[in-house]
Every structure is written in structure tokens, then in C-alpha cells.
């Protein structure tokens, strides 16, 4: 029964991703598409994933209030990359076994597997609760369990505010962009770029700094830096020119006391 459910989820995931990509392509031929609005929503979703899911939930790089924790968890969820507990569990597993057979998205199995194909693997939806004992608290648990409700509320609001064209501009296009800028860290940043730090936690880790990816995903592309010092909120610390937009936002939030104890 469990195997059948997992197969159904993988088929559903494949169809959802295919549909989103087809609509993404179609959106550029429609007269009502608005690139600036799509990029603005993409920027917010990127912060939800990289500031929230990654630097806060997966690595506890800062502390914040319950209200802001709920906000970044919900925004990350709207990026259609599953819930915060699944995301953090999968990412922590990646750090433990990077570029080995146990790595969920190692390029050792090919670029397409590392970039997007791993999401169709039969074990991908499993949460390893042993890796996230610190996250088994009310807010991330609630968001994990109510993802469909959050997506339904967002999509309904978009339709009411802007109709079908807004659904493409404020939902489909930003999500597809966010998928690929996020997934580029898993694929491109384990294949191309510099390695100023020795691979950690073992010699097989191929994490690299990739400036192009870092520009496209707001600083996450300084991936070798991140693997060397995972708990640091600042990924572009190795050189002054390593632009890290997520860290700049974190500094601004720290200034106004929305977050604190920023691990720099």
C-alpha cells in the first residue's frame, strides 16, 4: 500500500512539474504577462526558501520570533518545494553524505538527476525525523501538515485579485524560476566552480563556488564556502566581491530586531 502511494505521488509530482513548465513557456506568449511582477514574487519566494528553509530551519543561522518563523515557513512552502521539515531533513542528509550514493541529489548520478530528477526518486518524500529533532515544534509541524491549505489560500487570493493572467504571473512563472535557481545549487555548484576550502565532511564532497549561480539565486551559489562553514549566515564571506543578497537582507532584519543572534 505504501509503495503504491509513493508511486502515485511520484506520478503526480511529474505531471505537476510538466504542467508548470508548459504554462511557464506559454506565459511568455500572452499579452498580459508582467515580467517585473513575476520577478518580484520570485524574489520573495527565494527568500522564503534560502533565508527561511535553508539558513533558518536547516542550519539555525539566526534566531527570530514565532511570528516571523511562521511567515518565512509559509513563504517557503508557497515556493512549491515541500514543507520545512522535509526540506531541512533532506538538506541535512545532503551535508552528511555529499556526493556519495546516499546523497539525495548527487551529480554522480548525472546532471539531470542532481538538478531535478531526484525529486521523482521513490524514497524522496521520506522525512528522516532523526535529523531534525530541533524542528519538531508547533510552527514547522503545522506548516508541514497544512501545505495544501496554504497553496489553496494563495491561489484563491491570486485569482480573486488578478484573474487567470495573475495566476501565471504571480504563481506559475515565479515558482518555475525559483525551482531552477534553487536546484542549480545542487547541480551546477557540484560540477563547476572553485574550491578554496577542502571538501567537507569528507573528501568526496564536490561543492564549489559558482559566481553565476550566486548572482541568480541571491548568494546560495557560494556553495563551497557554505559546505566549509554550514552554520554561517553569510555564504559570500571568502572574498569581498562575493555578493550574497540573502545575507544583506538578514543584516537589515537584524538591524530592526526582527532576527537576532546572526551567526556570521
Image (spheres, rainbow, N blue to C red):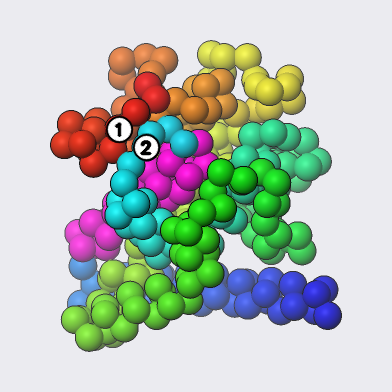
Task: Identify which residue is drawn at 69% across, 71% down.
Answer: 10
Q: Does the magenta run of residues contain 56?
A: yes
Task: Identify which residue is drawn at 70% across, 59% down.
Answer: 126
Name the disc covering residue 64, or none.
none
Near-viewer residue (203 or 73): 73
Position of residue 61 relative to residue 23, above or below, is above
Q: CA distance from mark 1 to mark 2?
A: 5 Å
Rendering coords of residue 37 (x, y %): 21, 63
Task: Identify which residue is drawn at 36% across, 57% down.
Answer: 70
Q: Which residue is the site of mark 1?
A: 260
- Asked whether residue 72 is in view, the answer is no
Q: Does the magenta run of residues contain 175?
A: no
SS class, disc 2: strand
Q: Residue furthest left?
A: 256
Task: Identify which residue is drawn at 56% across, 20% down.
Answer: 228
Check whether the beta carbons of the residues at disc 1 and disc 2 lie within 8 A of each other.
yes
Whichever of labels 1 and 2 marks the residue nearer the N terminus, that label is: 2
Rendering coords of residue 45 (x, y %): 35, 56
Amino acid at each position: 500500500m505504501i509503495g503504491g502511494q509513493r508511486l502515485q505521488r511520484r506520478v503526480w509530482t511529474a505531471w505537476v512539474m510538466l504542467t508548470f513548465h508548459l504554462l511557464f513557456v506559454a506565459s511568455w506568449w500572452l499579452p498580459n504577462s508582467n515580467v517585473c511582477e513575476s520577478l518580484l514574487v520570485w524574489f520573495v519566494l527565494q527568500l522564503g526558501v534560502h533565508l527561511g528553509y535553508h539558513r533558518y530551519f536547516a542550519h539555525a543561522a539566526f534566531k527570530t520570533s514565532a511570528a516571523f518563523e511562521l511567515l518565512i515557513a509559509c513563504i517557503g512552502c508557497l515556493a512549491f518545494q515541500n514543507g520545512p521539515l522535509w526540506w531541512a531533513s533532506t538538506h541535512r542528509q545532503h551535508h552528511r553524505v555529499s556526493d556519495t550514493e546516499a546523497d539525495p541529489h548527487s551529480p554522480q548520478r548525472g546532471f539531470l538527476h542532481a538538478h531535478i530528477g531526484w525529486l521523482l526518486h521513490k524514497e524522496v518524500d521520506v522525512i528522516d525525523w532523526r535529523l531534525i529533532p530541533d524542528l519538531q515544534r508547533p510552527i514547522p509541524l503545522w506548516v508541514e501538515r497544512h501545505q495544501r491549505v496554504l497553496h489553496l489560500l494563495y491561489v484563491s487570493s491570486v485569482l480573486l485579485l488578478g484573474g487567470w493572467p495573475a495566476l501565471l504571473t504571480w504563481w506559475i512563472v515565479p515558482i518555475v524560476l525559483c525551482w531552477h535557481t534553487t536546484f542549480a545549487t545542487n547541480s551546477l555548484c557540484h560540477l563547476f566552480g572553485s574550491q578554496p576550502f577542502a571538501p567537507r565532511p569528507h573528501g568526496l564532497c564536490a561543492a564549489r563556488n559558482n559566481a553565476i549561480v550566486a548572482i541568480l539565486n541571491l548568494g546560495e551559489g557560494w556553495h563551497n564556502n557554505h559546505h566549509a562553514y554550514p552554520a554561517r549566515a553569510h555564504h559570500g564571506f571568502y572574498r569581498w566581491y562575493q555578493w550574497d543578497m540573502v545575507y544583506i537582507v538578514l543584516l537589515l532584519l537584524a538591524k530592526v530586531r526582527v532576527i537576532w543572534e546572526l551567526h556570521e
